[in-house]
């Protein structure tokens, strides 16, 4: 009996360990796969052509800058919309709303996260794009901004859910102390609760942004997919083509092993690198914040 | 004791799984070689290719069930290039294409021991569509080329209102896109290097194009005549600079007046025989060509 238990323990410990390592192994394997399929681009396509601003692969134009720019501008737009809305919504749910409202609101917001992106895309084509065109008086409603709005809609549930958990886990005593010292409810939220939950809120924001940069379907349906080089914030209201939409739209038809195929994988590498960079920066900020918070509180 | 019990539960499962996998093996294999061994009234025909043709091919496959119940035809889309690539790889019997096979594709096929045979199965006209509110109702090929290459940026320049032009196109992987590039933007000139203006919106589906044009008076788009609905305005097109301007229709395509029309093809891997030949013969009957008309394409036999 004893033996069988220790044997089981051993098995379970190792299974948990393998599961833990598997995340790393998968990421490394995916990266190796991307490198294998995409690195040939650097030899096949001259750097000058790769860094040009014209993407028209069926005629041999492989400039990926408009695609990177498109992804960045859509992501920035989505972040600008989603972060204030999401964080404020989390604050409302965690700090202001009465118990019963909170118990209805939170599951509802989390339900939003389950909406299929194709459905959001149709909503975008049929409702949001026409509205954007008429309200903003732009030539077409299929713009980076339309995509950003829908992506914000997808990121907000994630941000609200994670940020609300973080705010909720701030000890009651912090708030009580602040209120006892004569701070108003708003001052308590802004100066005490939010800073105390900072790392959790930041994680929420990063998860939300991570979701927007990788999203494909919605973006492909509503941003117009024109590979135009963005020149500033004004480009937010013009069509854009993101890296994800390019890969999704073109991968199905491309001849395996061709220059175009390798370049699509190269775009995948760039996307991977950008996501990694965002995560690294976020991890660094969270780490630094935590240290400071510990110093202040000790 | 418990361990023993668990073993007893897992064992039949593994056996079952192995059995299930065994069942899967034959279904992975290719059906017996087409034509030669298949009798004339039974068998499976794999049909794949152009998204333009996919609805037509499906309707044909369905109708053919009544004619020849023993023959099963499975139809998939994916684009002309995909269909021809599958034909070259030997995974389909019939490839649908909305363009002629390219010389390099023929070379690839021959390297694989396959000699594609071409059949014209229907005709398709590409309709130029705008919003119902747009007063413009005719354009020349030159004007279309200038609009799509970005030389003309305002509807005023082609006799319309003072509005910016929003150009809509299918994605670059669509056979319709390539045809439009070659026949309209480059006017059929092989040495012409004209490209779509970079701000051309590339939409992944016909539906995306119709949806945008329906609500946007600035937009211009193109699509197969089969996909044009009543809530879109079709533009009359002229090949030369001063007309005649022709609206696309079955008549104007078949007597070759409408300038942006093309043949639709099916390719077989070799001279067809048996079930495939019967199917291709049936496609070119008046009965099958009536379906072509129903779907908005142009029949080759009236």
Image: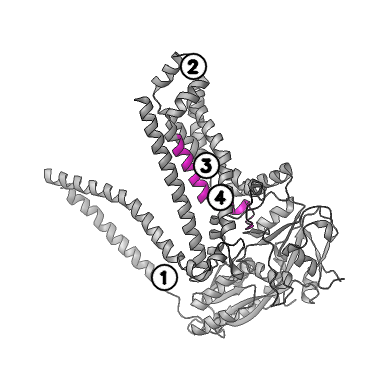
Labels 3 and 1 within one chain? no
Labels 4 and 3 within one chain? yes
The residue lying furthest to the left in this view is: A2
Task: Tell me the crowding category of disc 1: few under 14, some 14 to 19, or many 20 or more residues within 10 angstroms, Cα based.
Answer: few
Split into 4 quadrants, where in the image is the N terminus of chain A? top left
Q: Is residue B70 visible?
A: no
Residue B190 in which image quadrant:
bottom right
Q: CA distance from mark 2 to mark 1?
A: 72 Å
Q: Chain of mark 1?
A: B
Q: CA distance from mark 2 to mark 3?
A: 32 Å
Residue A183 has which mark? Answer: 2
The secondary element bearing badge 3 is classed as: helix
Residue at position x 54%, y 79% in the image: B41
Eye-nearest disc, 4 or 3:
4
**N-terminal-most mark, 4 or 3:** 4
Q: Is residue A181 above or below residue B65?
A: above
- From the image, tell me which residue sits under label 1: B28
How many numbered circles does the render carry?
4
Q: Are marks 4 and 2 in contact (CB under 8 Å)?
A: no
A226 horizontally vs A266: left or right: right
Q: CA distance from mark 4 to mark 1?
A: 43 Å
- From the image, tell me which residue sits under label 4: A72
- From the image, tell me which residue sits under label 3: A155
- Residue A27 screen position, x and y as percent: 38, 54
Q: Are marks 4 and 3 in contact (CB under 8 Å)?
A: no
Q: Are marks 4 and 1 in contact (CB under 8 Å)?
A: no
Residue at position x 37%, y 33% in the image: A291
- Residue B133 screen position, x and y as percent: 81, 52
Main SS, magenta region, reads helix
Q: Which residues are magenta?
A: A201-228
Labels 4 and 1 within one chain? no
């Amino acid at each position: 009996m004893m033996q069988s238990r220790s044997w089981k323990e051993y098995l379970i410990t190792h299974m948990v360990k393998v599961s833990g390592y598997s995340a790393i192994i998968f990421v490394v394997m995916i990266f190796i796969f991307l490198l294998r399929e995409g690195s040939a681009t650097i030899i096949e396509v001259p750097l000058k052509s790769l860094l040009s601003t014209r993407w028209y692969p069926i005629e041999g134009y492989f400039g990926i800058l408009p695609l990177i720019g498109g992804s960045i501008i859509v992501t920035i737009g989505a972040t600008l919309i989603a972060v204030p809305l999401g964080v404020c919504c989390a604050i409302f749910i965690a700090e202001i709303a009465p118990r019963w409202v909170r118990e209805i609101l939170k599951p509802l917001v989390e339900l939003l996260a389950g909406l299929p992106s194709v459905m959001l895309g149709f909503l975008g084509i049929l409702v949001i794009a026409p509205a954007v065109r008429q309200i903003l008086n732009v030539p077409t409603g299929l713009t980076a901004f339309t995509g950003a709005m829908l992506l914000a809609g997808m990121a907000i549930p994630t941000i609200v859910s994670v940020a609300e958990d973080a705010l909720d886990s701030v000890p009651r005593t912090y708030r009580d102390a602040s209120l006892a010292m004569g701070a108003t409810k708003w001052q308590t939220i802004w100066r005490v609760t939010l800073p105390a939950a900072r790392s959790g809120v930041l994680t929420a924001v990063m998860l939300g942004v991570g979701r927007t940069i990788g999203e494909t379907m919605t973006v492909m349906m509503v941003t117009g997919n024109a590979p135009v080089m963005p020149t500033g914030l004004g480009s937010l209201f013009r069509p854009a083509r993101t890296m994800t939409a390019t890969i999704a739209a073109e991968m199905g038809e491309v001849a395996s092993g061709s220059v175009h195929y390798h370049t699509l994988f190269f775009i995948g590498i760039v996307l991977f690198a950008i996501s990694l960079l965002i995560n690294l920066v976020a991890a660094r900020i969270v780490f630094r914040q935590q240290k400071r918070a510990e110093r202040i509180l000790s | 004791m418990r361990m023993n019990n668990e073993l007893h539960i897992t064992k039949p499962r593994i056996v079952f799984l192995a059995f299930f996998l065994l069942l899967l093996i034959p279904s992975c294999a290719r059906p017996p070689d087409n034509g030669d061994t298949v009798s004339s009234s039974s068998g499976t025909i794999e049909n794949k290719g152009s998204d333009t043709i996919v609805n037509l091919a499906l309707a044909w496959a369905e109708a053919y069930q009544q004619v020849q119940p023993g023959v099963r035809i499975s139809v998939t889309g994916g684009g002309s290039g995909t269909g021809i690539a599958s034909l070259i790889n030997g995974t389909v019997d019939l490839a649908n294409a909305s363009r002629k096979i390219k010389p390099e594709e023929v070379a690839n096929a021959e390297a694989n021991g396959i000699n594609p045979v071409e059949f014209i199965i229907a005709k398709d006209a590409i309709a130029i569509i705008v919003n119902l509110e747009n007063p413009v109702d005719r354009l020349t090929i030159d004007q279309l080329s200038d609009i799509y290459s970005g030389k003309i940026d305002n509807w005023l320049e082609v006799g319309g209102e003072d509005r910016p032009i929003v150009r809509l196109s299918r994605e670059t992987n669509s056979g319709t896109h390539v045809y439009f590039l070659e026949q309209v933007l480059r006017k059929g000139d092989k040495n012409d290097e004209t490209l779509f203006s970079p701000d051309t919106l590339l939409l992944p589906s016909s539906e995306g194009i119709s949806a945008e044009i329906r609500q946007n008076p600035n937009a211009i788009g193109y699509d197969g005549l089969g996909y044009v609905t009543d809530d879109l305005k079709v533009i009359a097109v002229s090949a030369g600079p001063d007309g005649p301007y022709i609206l696309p229709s079955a008549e104007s395509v078949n007597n070759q007046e409408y300038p942006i029309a093309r043949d639709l093809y099916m390719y077989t891997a070799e001279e067809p025989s048996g079930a495939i030949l019967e199917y291709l013969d049936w496609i070119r009957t008046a009965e099958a060509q009536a379906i072509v008309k129903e779907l908005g394409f142009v029949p080759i036999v009236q």
